[in-house]
Image (spheres, rainbow, N blue to C red):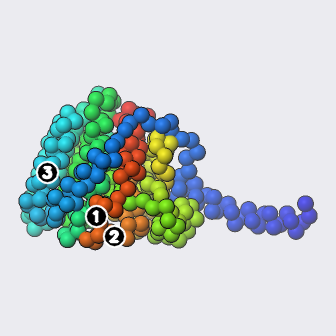
Amino acid sequence: MNTRTRILCWFLGLLVLPVVIIWCVVAQPVFTSKGRSKAVVNPESLRKHVVAFSQDFVPRSYDDAGNMARCVAYISGCFRQTGAVVTNQAYVAYRKTPCQNIIALFPGQDTQRVVIGAHYDAVPGTPGADDNASGVAGLLELARLLHGTKLRHTVELVAFCSEEPPCYDSEHMGSSHHAQTLAKQRIPVVAMIALEMIGTFSEAPGSQRYPVPLLRLFYGSKANFIGVVGDLSQRPLIRTVKSQMQGSTDLLVRSVSVPSFLPGVDYSDHKNYWENNFPAVMITDTAFYRNRRYHSPDDTADRLDYKRMSDVVVGVYEAVVALASGE
């Protein structure tokens, strides 16, 4: 190798090395795959849940007392069918509006807690099929999978109210009330997982967008994966969740760990657990970076991919069982 070739190799190495380091920090590659899961989720069950929330309970704004009550009854009924201990957490949101979180508790051998949540309210004037009937449907089917599962740590499923504006990013969020309650009661939270839009997928090139163009280099242009999202401090939890989801089904699982100021990283209920010093991540189809119907009347049930949604729920189940067993 002559001197010119050697210099060129060193130069290319200096260019590639920073990209590799960034990829390892941001994307957290996991090179091993979990064995295929034995858990099964029926896509039709997910579809029925999404149709109920996005067609029967519309509008689903936090201040629509009638439909909020219907949502509470529906979610509570589904939770009770799994044998969980079901309670409602009442609180007052924006403009003194009464709201309720619905909680399903699956007791473990100790008091440590694994929390999984999804908000059931929607932006006024929208059906909210992907945002976030998809997440709530996943939560309900996750409850069904947890029935009879032996757990070391207690698992708590929570359907939140008042996530959308005008309550978003304020103390009026249902998840804020729930996280603060856990903190005040000094309940040791092992992990929190927020299910935020899990139903939109596409194999079309260019269907996936990103807040930073460089990320396309890491993740590609197709919206064919589910994301595990958190800030830099959540890297251990992200790796655990991703490693349990990856390989449990055919679904591609990607993760991102970046500073919290990057747009979209803290755009859901998990942010309120960060504020109370609990480890938390978001499971998402990346919302408006993929779903062009985000917060619009076109976010309807017929546009979701229920097969891949079922794979998401199975993957989350495997992650929850691992976290709740102390792995």
Q: Answer with left or right where residue 205 lies relative to residue 182.
A: right
| Any part of residue 236 in sight | no
Residue type at mark 3 is Val
Q: Answer with left or right where residue 27 lies relative to residue 193.
A: right
| Any part of residue 51 in sight | yes
Look at mark 1 in the image and give the residue it sits on: 300
- Secondary element type, mark 2: loop
Q: Measuring 53% from the left and 56% from the top, which residue is drawn there? A: 27
Q: Which mark is residue 323?
A: none
Q: Position of residue 293 (x, y in %)?
A: 33, 70
Q: Position of residue 212 (x, y in %)?
A: 50, 70
Q: Measuring 58% from the left and 45% from the top, which residue is drawn there? A: 31
- Residues tagged 3 and 2 counted as in contact (Cβ below 8 A): no
Look at mark 3 in the image and give the residue it sits on: 72
Q: Tell which circle, 1 or 2, labels the residue nearer the N-terminal end.
A: 2
Look at mark 2 in the image and give the residue it sits on: 293
Q: Compared with residue 133, is residue 81 higher up or lower down, i.e. above or below?
A: above
Residue type at mark 2 is Arg
Q: Answer with left or right where residue 154 lies relative to residue 2.
A: left
Which mark's residue is nearer the viewer, 3 or 1?
1
Position of the C terminus by quadrant: top left
Residue type at mark 1 is Thr
Tell me if mark 3 has few (under 14), some (14-19) or many (20+) residues whose alpha carbon lies within 10 angstroms of its own.
some
Q: Tell which circle, 3 or 2, labels the residue nearer the N-terminal end.
A: 3
Q: Residue furthest right?
A: 2
Tell me if mark 1 has few (under 14), some (14-19) or many (20+) residues whose alpha carbon lies within 10 angstroms of its own.
many
Q: Measuring 23% from the left and 47% from the top, which residue is drawn there? A: 158
Which mark's residue is nearer the viewer, 3 or 2?
2
Q: CA distance from mark 1 to mark 2?
A: 9 Å
